[in-house]
Amino acid sequence: MTDHTVPPIGMRMVKTAAAVLICLLVSMAVDREDMRIYSSIAALLCVQPYAEDTKRMAIQRIVGTAIGSVFGIATLLLEMDLDIQGTLVGYIVIAAVTVPNLWIAVVLKSSNAAALSGIVFLSITVTHVTDASPWIFAWYRASETLVGIAVGIAVNAFQLPRRKRRDVLFVSGLDGLLLTEQGTLTPYSRVSLNRMLDDGMQFTLSTMRTPASVREATRDLRLRLPVIVMDGAALYDMEKKRYLHACVLPRELALRCEAVFRAQGIHCFLNGVLDDNLMIYYGEFHHETERAIFEKLRTSPYRNYVSRSYYKDCPIVYLMGIDLTERMQALYDALGEAGLLEQVKVRFYPAAEYPGYSYLKIYERSASREAMLERLKQDLGMERSVVLTTQEGCGDVVIRGGANQAVKRLGRLFEPYLWEQK
């Protein structure tokens, strides 16, 4: 299904508009008409999603301005000396010099400066009038561009006084909170979350997904803390690619549960952790939905699918099966009749991507997101946490309205204004 959600107006857009307005007002105040164009363009190019990007881009824009100015004044002096301004030969010279002008920016590893270098170069060579001093004209173009860069930096750095709640561990799920229906982060969520993470927000995820699925969905996030995965059955360090804690099913209990699957004619995936690698043991598939899941996920570098016949002593974290809902209900009932429901934790829920089918997952009985969160807080030496959720009674803050709403609320929680109550 195509996502037709209209993207919100982001803060970068607002700041860019403010920077352009300031440039126009400055131009009006100093009565410099040409400044309106060149300073506004520079400001527009300089405002970036992240503060560190703005500084880096500003440096590259200054480099680009210098390169464009040098090539511009040199070309302009050459045109005036040969008296070819405004002629076909003059235009050919301008076009030819454009190549080394852009090439120098790339050689200096300032590829982002190339655009502004070209703009400054053309603003000097193409718009120059014959009765103006080429040196003064070039200085005006360069200074106007630098004004725009300065305004862009200032506007992007400005924010109302806020305090950072770095002593609080913020926790969010993925599906229904941060991710869209297509399983991706919106650009707004990605930029905003990364900015807060760079500002020192203590943030982690708590999800039913495996580390492999989390990594794929959050590849653009700069997550630093371990994440709670597999519905609280494991704590995983994304940076070190290590399982810090795992609630393992006793081997005999796991095999007894698998035997009930087999008796009901339902295939079971055994998900285990061996040397910090996710091992998924599979048998003979009974329907195309199972095979589709296998074919979709088996090429992932973070999953290791192994034939069930090779299973020996790998610690099992959870069992998973998928089949028609009525068959899974019969499996659930059979687990109860075997006296296993009291010994394990079971998750039985519809498969949203496969209508008419349901998942059934079996975990070690003590596995829970709440318990793993407490363990993480203990590891981090933190006492306070705020959990974002979509369900009443399952967290501290209930979110309604989609992915962007969760990030907006997270921003208000992490960065309240100074005058707001703690």
Image: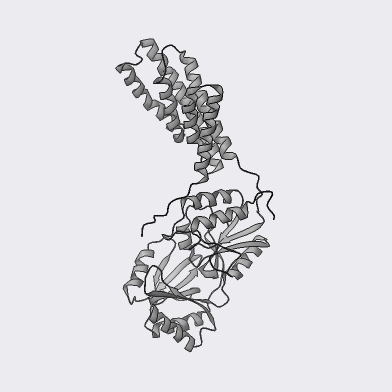
> Residue 392 appears at what percent x and percent y?
57, 69
> Residue 403 appears at what percent x and percent y?
49, 57
Q: Is residue 32 above or below residue 349?
A: above
Q: How many labels does the image show?
A: 0
The residue at 47%/19% (across/down) is 138
Relative horizontal placement of residue 359, taking residue 168 as reference (left or right): left
Residue 239 appears in view: no
Which residue is nearer to you in this view: 303 or 260?
260
The residue at 49%/80% (across/down) is 254
Relative horizontal placement of residue 42, taking residue 164 as reference (left or right): left
Q: Is residue 152 above or below residue 415?
A: above
In what quadrant of the picture does the C terminus appear? bottom right
Residue 32 appears in view: yes
Name the quadrant containing residue 371: bottom right
> Residue 155 appears at what percent x and percent y?
57, 37
Name the quadrant containing residue 96: top left
The residue at 57%/72% (across/down) is 368
Relative horizontal placement of residue 307, taking residue 13 as reference (left or right): left
Q: In this view, does 331 lie above or below 290?
A: below
Q: In this view, does 76 lie above or below 40?
A: above
Which residue is nearer to you in this view: 382 or 353?
353
In what quadrant of the picture does the N terminus appear? bottom left
Q: Residue furthest bottom?
A: 337
The residue at 40%/61% (across/down) is 300
Coloring applied to the structure:
one colour
> Residue 68 appears at what percent x and percent y?
45, 25
